[in-house]
Image (cartoon, rainbow, N blue to C red):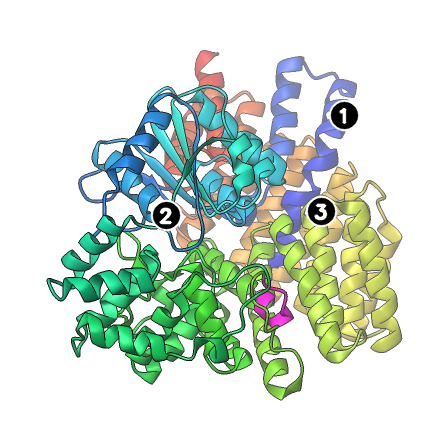
Amino acid sequence: MRRSRVLIATLAPLATGGLAWWACVAGGMDLDTTGIVVGLVVLLPATPLAIWAGAGESRRAPVREPVRPEGGAAAIGEVPRRPRAFQQRPGLRDRIEEILASGRPCCLIGGKGVGKTQLAAAYARTCLDDGVPVAWLAAEPLTAALAEMAGELGLLREGDGPEEVRRKVRSWLAGRREPYVLVLDSAADPDEVAALLPATGGTRVLITTNTHAFERVAEPVVVDRFTAGEALAYLRERVGPGDVAAARALVRELDRLPLALAVAAACMVGPPRLPYSAYIARLRAEPVDRLLERPSGEPYPRGVAQAILLSLRAVGRASRELLAELSVMAPAGVGTEFLEGERLTELAGQSLISFSRDGSTVVVHRLVQRVVRESEGSLAATVERAGRRLLGIREVADEDTWRRLPYINAVDGHAAALWQHTKGDTKGDTRGGPRGGPRGDAAAELVLEVRQAVAQHFLYLNDGLRAAPILREVAEGWARLHGQDDPRVLEARHRLATAHEFAGRFEEAVERFGQVVADRARVLGSGHPDTLHSRARLASSLSGAGRFAPELFESVVADQARVLGPDDPATLITRFNQALAHAGAGRHEEAVALFEAVVADQGRVLGESHPETLVSRGRLAQACAGAGRTGAAIVLFERVLGDQERVVGADHPDTLITRLGLAAAYEAAGEREEARREYGRVAERMEAVLGAQQPMTAAAWEGLARVSAG
């Protein structure tokens, strides 16, 4: 019944409010009672599942406490920890502080590997230690980073697109009067960033980029290579005293590039420990031009590729393979939950990886990622190995989606990165992806499987906006591998149509479901269960689009009962949706009769106390309320509430939603003391369980205030 429960949040509120208002007025109810009944009718169709999943509030998690680093303020995102032998670069540091103190945004502009991110991180760490909160966003792509930030702040609502998310975050930043720091690391699009910058408020914005076009967006600070003195000081602190002349020669060889010096220093520290002269000899002997392609117009900074390759040679094969996998995953970093049991010390010792400040995320510099991708074996094999790290997504049960959402979001980011490599269109990767051949196809198959699992979890949360673009690429990928008529392609297209339905794009969903029905009937047959399933979804989408199709529902129910049996879960789902569609069309009495029949059959097939049966009983109570049977609704709500407390617990979202419905029914019936008691109980528990930002929580508090004022 999962799809049924999700559909409630999408379909039922669309029509019931206006129709209930009309019915109440026509029946002679006073305005106060009418308002209560309409509120009850509109409020309750949002199912417990959808509310638990955050439908109508946040497409991610509820408002979470941001990470609080040791001894500092709250942080959103992963602020890099202080690297060894960090050079303060006081001239640059002072200029950054001067610009930000003036209220102007600041952008650090420079080539790859010059230390822009570390300078920004040093400023962020200082702010955190001073009690100033920081949001650290990996700004490529900025859209995804803003969505994560909005989710942390509790700003997201169901249906918010990228522009709306950007507007909300900008408004929130502009509304802050206390100091706040926003760091946009590795930004690529100045227009996108300009649309985010707040015109007022206490937010300081620091940007890192290699694009000089940002000079028109923020006050620029050009970051170049170390000075000779800084480079020597770094080597002296990191490696120790040695031959000064040889150290100077190494600085020249590596062109004072901070990243190259960090990699070289880690290699010299060993074990085994190397003197400067020996390292220089190895560096000059490294045949980098034969090992790596040099992209036209974007050569590697002098010495850095050789330095990275030397460090690669210094670690074992297992570590090299692990680094290769990290180099095809999301550049923002890989959580340690994907790396359990891995020996990261060897890679960290060679400065090939770094860690976030709290140690929960492993980060590989983008330039290191590119060098490794272009030098380490088969890209297809690497993508396949990395993809296997994500297969844990298959073990996440639907009912655990909400609890595991941070993990699912992380898998989404990594799977998207792997898919770009699979397609071979990743920026800066000139070798192309693992297309063609058994190994390339195997990598693509695995990534598609992971992405489809991610999308299915988003659908479980009624988050069609996030699921749709994933499913579009999944359908295209399966079609490229197996042809348009492959059942996997048809299933992905069906889910894509479902995503549009859940996103409220009913007309597009109707069009897509119509095409899938036709193609499934042609390929599988008109009586195939999958074809019938798509017909059922088409009927639901038509209702959502305001084109109630009772005949189609009746036809599908009859065909499913004949092919699958009347007690098959798919048949029960369609009957549930049929009842829901009648309620949405204002046919409340018919909806009551249909829900009663569904409840009876679910009780017989699943059991009277099965959670799904209880949900349907709650929807029956809601249908009675819509039909004006307030007394019957109260009795049903009270019975369901007692059973849900016994079966799933008093704090389960299903139970809380039922209690809220009961409170509203008491209010509509004029039983103010009972309504006040139930509103008070459910408001406190909803705030504790679902969060203060949830619309249902707010509705409970508003109901309590309303009955208390009377």
Q: What residue would you read off at disc 3? A: 580
Q: Give the image location of residue 150, x and y in percent.
A: 48, 38
Residue shown at the point (86%, 69%) measured from the top left: 519
Categorize mark 3 by other alpha carbons within 10 Å: few (<14), some (14-19), many (20+).
many
Q: Which amino acid, by three-letter code, is at mark 3? A: Leu
Q: Confirm whether residue 349 shows in the render.
A: no
Q: Is residue 41 above or below residue 404?
A: above
Residue shown at the point (60%, 34%) measured from the top left: 164
Categorize mark 2 by other alpha carbons within 10 Å: few (<14), some (14-19), many (20+).
many
Q: Which amino acid, by three-letter code, is at mark 2? A: Thr
Q: Is residue 62 above or below residue 419?
A: above
Q: What residue would you read off at disc 1? A: 23
Going from N to C along the chain, the mark reached first, 3 or 2, is 2
Distance from the alpha carbon under mark 3 to that under mark 2: 53 Å
Element at label 1: helix
Which-is-in-front pick, marks 2 and 1? 2
Which-is-in-front pick, marks 3 and 2? 2
Kindly give the residue lying farthest to the left in the view shown. Answer: 241
Circles 2, 1 touching at the beta carbon (< 8 Å): no
The quadrant of the rendering that contains the N terminus is bottom right
Categorize mark 1 by other alpha carbons within 10 Å: few (<14), some (14-19), many (20+).
some
Q: Give the image location of residue 561, x and y in percent.
A: 78, 69
Q: Is residue 536 left or right of residue 522?
A: left
Kindly give the residue lying farthest to the bottom in the view shown. Answer: 438
**Range of magenta residues:** 420-426
Q: Give the image location of residue 177, x and y in percent.
A: 37, 19
Q: Is residue 412 above or below residue 139?
A: below
Q: Give the image location of residue 314, x and y in percent.
A: 28, 79
Residue shown at the point (47%, 79%) measured from the top left: 291
The tag on residue 117 is 2
Distance from the alpha carbon under mark 2 to that under mark 1: 62 Å
Q: Which amino acid, by three-letter code, is at mark 1? A: Ala
